[in-house]
Structures are given as C-alpha cells and as structure tokens.
Amino acid sequence: MTAKKPQHLPNFSIQKKEFNINDFILSKELLINEDIIIDPFYCNECQSIFKNFSSCNNCKKLICLDCIGKYCKFCKNYYYECGIDKNLISLLNNIKLKCPLICHNTFLYKNLKEHVMKYCPNTTLIYTCFFCEKKFEIIPNKTDLSLLEIHNQKCEDVLLQCSFCEIVYKRNEIKNHLNVCQEKFIYCTECKLEYKLKFESPHKEFFCKVIKKEKEDINKIIEEFKNKDI
C-alpha cells in the first residue's frame, strides 16, 4: 500500500482590523465640498482634518491633540483643555468625506468608523492561524492571498492526520510518528508482500518464511509441469 500524504486540517479565523483613527490621514483632498471652510478643523502640522482634538481653555480654539505641546499654538499660553462647543462638533460631524481607503464611497465625518468597520470593501482584515496564532494583515483585492497557503504549508503547529492510524499530530511531530506508526504498511523485499508495522515481528519470524516456502513449492511444481510438457 502506497503511503498517502498526511491530511491537512488548516484554517484561519478572520476579523476586521480594530479601528484606530490614527491609521488614517484625513487630507483636504477627501472633502466632497472643496469650498467648505475647513481651517478651524484642520491641523497644518499633521496635514489632516482633526482626529483627536480638544479646545483651549484660554482662546477656545480647537487644538489637534496629536500635535499639541505644553503651549497653545494660537494664544501661546499654557494649554489647558476645556469642553468643545457643540456647534463646532456638529459642523465637523456633518462634513462629507471621501473614503480614505479609496473605496469611492462617501460619508459624513461622524460615520467614519462605521463605514470602515461595516461597509468599506478595502478595510484591512486580520487572518489569524488557528494553530500558531500568527496574524496576517490582508487588504482585500490588494494582498496576495497565496501567503496564507504558504503559511499553511510551513506552519509547525498545523494539525496533520496520519493516513495510516488517522490520529492527528502537529506537523513538527508527524514525521517522527510516521517512522513508528504501528498501522503503517511495510513492503517485505523477501516475500514481496506488505504487512503492518505492528506485525513486523511475527511476519519476519514466521509468516515471511511460510510464504517464501509456499512460493518456492509452487514454483517447483510449475517447473515440473513444464519439464513434463517437454
């Protein structure tokens, strides 16, 4: 019996990458209405519409928290945070943007997270190997998925099923197991038959000798008949 390849049982869990607004640069090019006054909501240092922001307690202007130091860049006073005017928040939330992941959809600023996590076809997916828990960031329609198959073929923790005894082992264990699996078939070069490894001792000590003797007797009889015909 020819040995089969160990059977693969590969798989990945799939989930969307956790939303982090700092992964995005919300440039002015994303504005649907380019005539809108965006300056109060735009940081010239990080070149992005505000993502994390607050208001200066002294001058009340909006401040980009990703770039702020000890002093407000507008009034030059020591920066103290205060609440943000609700009207300003409403204005920012209702600015219409193009998707920063270039999926060609549009949405309101306040719906950025919802779009990225629920609707955007270009959202990064996290594929996690069930076996070794290694994570792969996959961008749909951009990342070559063959790297997942390559991982399946090399992952030392992938489970493989022995084709003889059908017990499951990790890849890094299966090779040693195949050398000693008692259900594995061995080809006997003496009697030309196969036997399971667990029967190796009785085969060599008894069955092989009997089979060889029977074959010799049969061949002897055949030769006798041939000689008679002659």
Image (cartoon, helix red, strand yellow):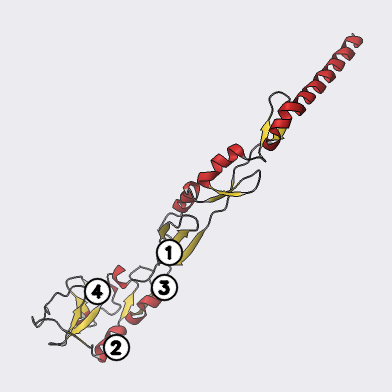
Q: Earlier in the sequence, mark 3 or mark 2?
A: 2
Asked if labels 1 and 2 touch by Cβ distance under 8 angstroms, the answer is no
Q: CA distance from mark 3 to mark 1?
A: 10 Å
Q: Residue 102: horizontal and vertical position, in percent?
A: 35, 68
Q: Nearer the viewer, mark 2 or mark 1?
A: 1
Secondary structure beneath label 1: strand
Q: Nearer the viewer, mark 1 or mark 4?
A: 1
Specify the farthest residue to the right: 228
Residue under pointer 4: 28
Q: Earlier in the sequence, mark 3 or mark 4?
A: 4
Secondary structure beneath label 2: helix
Residue flagged by tag 2: what amino acid is it? Answer: Ser
Q: CA distance from mark 4 to mark 2?
A: 19 Å
Residue flagged by tag 1: what amino acid is it? Answer: Leu
Q: Residue 139: horizontal and vertical position, in percent?
A: 40, 61
Say left or right for 99 vs 28: right
Say left or right for 31 vs 72: right
Residue under pointer 3: 117
Q: Earlier in the sequence, mark 2 or mark 1?
A: 2
Residue under pointer 2: 90
Q: Nearer the viewer, residue 182 or 25?
A: 182
Q: Earlier in the sequence, mark 3 or mark 1?
A: 3
Specify the farthest residue to the left: 76
For the C terminus, give its image quadrant.
Answer: top right
Residue flagged by tag 3: what amino acid is it? Answer: Met
Residue under pointer 1: 125
Image quadrant in which you'd find residue 6: top right
Mark 1 Cα shell of 10 Å, populated few (<14), some (14-19), many (≥20)? some
